Amino acid sequence: MPTSQISTLERTSGWAKFGRYSLLTLIAVIVLLPVYAVVMQAFKTGAGAMDHPRSLLPVDLTTETIRVAWTKGDMGTLMRNSLVMSVLVTIGVLATSLLSAYAFAFLEFPFKRTLFALFLATMLVPAEVTILINKRTIDSFGWKNSMTGLTVPLMATALGTFLIRQVFLQVPSELREAAALDGLGHGRFLYEVAAPLSRPTLGALGLLSFLTTWNQYLWPQTIIDDTEHRTLQIGLSRLSNADINRLNLVTAGTVIAAIPIVILLIVFQRQLVRGLTAGAVKG
Amino acid sequence: MKRRWRDAPTALMMLAPSLALLGLFVFYPLVRAIWLGQQACDNTGNACHSVGWSQYIDVYRSNEFQNALGNTFTFAAITVPLGIILGVGLAIVADKHLRGIGVFRTIFSSTIASSVAVASLIWFVLLNPQLGALANVFDGIFPVLKRPGLLNDGGTALPAVALSSVWAGLGFTFVIVTAALQSIPRDLYESAFVDGAGSWRRFTNVTLPMLSPTLLFIGVVITARAFQAYGEVDLLTQGGPNAAGRPTETIAYFIYGKTSRISNQLGLQSASAVLLFIILLVLSFIQFRVLERRVHYAN
């Protein structure tokens, strides 16, 4: 947009700017206050965290609590399980979505509209309705307390199919016809042309899947009841059962648990915004 | 006609993985849950027998379900308006071409990094009367923070759980509204400005109408989240604080919670889950049909 358009509206005086920065800073402080308090407590000993209001000041800092939380909470295992689960589900979602999106965008077959409508209808069914029965299905497959049981049921989503299909529909049909004349089959066309074209959407969808899977709570709680396969979100709560004098072990645990996602968000900020807004305009 | 069938084998192969998974883990359990909703089962969930479709009505009318439904509506009545107002407010404050605005935007969206579990445990500690900094530092102003503590008082527990949910969802609404604000054409503001509209008029006559589809979307998402609220209840109150009243038992917790009265009763759980599904469907339908008329879509 031409800069002259912005200038009339957004030319602001020094005082207005000062006011705006003050407001922004105030809000930032309020938003970050809980985070700050938690980080401070995580770096204190149990006694130091109970010493108010000194507990909020950056004094007497120690990494002891973080270390105890890491070993006592078995957080290495928890983090590995969450990571494996999220990566597997993300790969699964990308693969199944690419394939079904291709079928819906480039192929003609009977009942195509009906099937697509059925796909979309699954978005209306909340997981809370299906988990009761899925738990029993997983049990009967012998998949309880296994990574297979945890990940396989989450590997297909209608949202993924829908988002990638939107990109595929933009591909000119001449391109597909020309490729067919060159003897390019559907598999190779998908792999060499269609998938690379949809890379930005795949990135956004991948990040979104990773985050949603990482944050799953009810599902892993239902499928896993041994310590070996427990994920971060479920395992964290064990720290809150520790004795009251060391309740700041919980804060140390949340700090450790948040770090991978903070890093992920800083690195992939653009893809995340794309992913979230792609979901937002799906209607 | 020939083309319609020629691709069919390829299409079937490509659709097979998604079809199998969605069929087995969405459609089958949905149908099965609807069926089980009229059955009574033993504690293991086997040996079920039919007790009639009226079980749905019995469950709906039961005090326990009505309590959970009321709590869930209260939860939504706090999280939906507060989430929207705070998200929009933050996004508008940060929607300026200023040096360093990126830093503020990153801070405002930072709660995206917290999962339900992380956010709940953060507030669990902050509000804890023994350890919590909030409870102890603001003790003099809000005595309830310390005695008995927000989460331990039947009257304040539900709003406290909702507060943690609003805080956790703030980053999400901020990111969505910011993206929507940036897609509003600047010349709309320009012409409003030329017509002599002040900043409040520009907000009500340009920003709000252009944002309305986004606000509708956010409203639907936060409402659905409220009806699926489980993790925060499980970690913060387990439906309590006092076991009798169940002041924080949401519908999702009523179905799945370890301390719920119907845990281990597959028939009643299924009926409740299907009722949750129907309520959500009706709510989304109302939100889209009724509110859509007031929503302004560009083009």
Image (tube, rainbow, N blue to C red):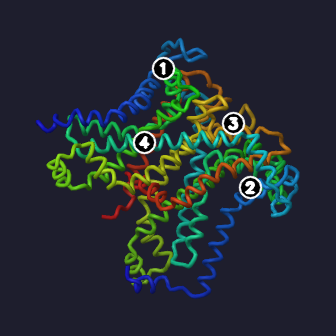
Per the image, label 4 sits on a secondary structure element best described as helix
Disc 3 marks which residue? B238
Crowding around mark 2 (Cα neighbors within 10 Å: few <14, some 14 to 19, many 20+) is many
Residue type indicated by callout 3: Gln
Nearest to viewer (mark 4 / mark 3) = 4
- Tell which of B138 and A63 is nearer to you: A63
- Same subunit, labels 2 and 1: the answer reads no
Q: Few, some or many C-alpha atoms within 10 Å of disc 1 (few <14, some 14-19, many ≥20)?
A: many
Q: Are marks 2 and 1 in contact (CB under 8 Å)?
A: no
**Residue under the image location 44 percent in, 58 percent down:** A274
Q: Is residue B82 visible?
A: no
Callout 1: SS: loop
Badge nearest the viewer, 2 or 1: 2
Residue drawn at 86 percent across, 52 percent down: A50
Residue A246 location (% of width, % of height) = 83, 45
**In the displayed structure image, the side of residue A207 where residue B10 appears, left or right:** left
Q: Chain of mark 1?
A: B
Pointer 2 and pointer 4 on the same chain: yes
Residue that badge 1 annotates: B38
Q: Chain of mark 2?
A: A
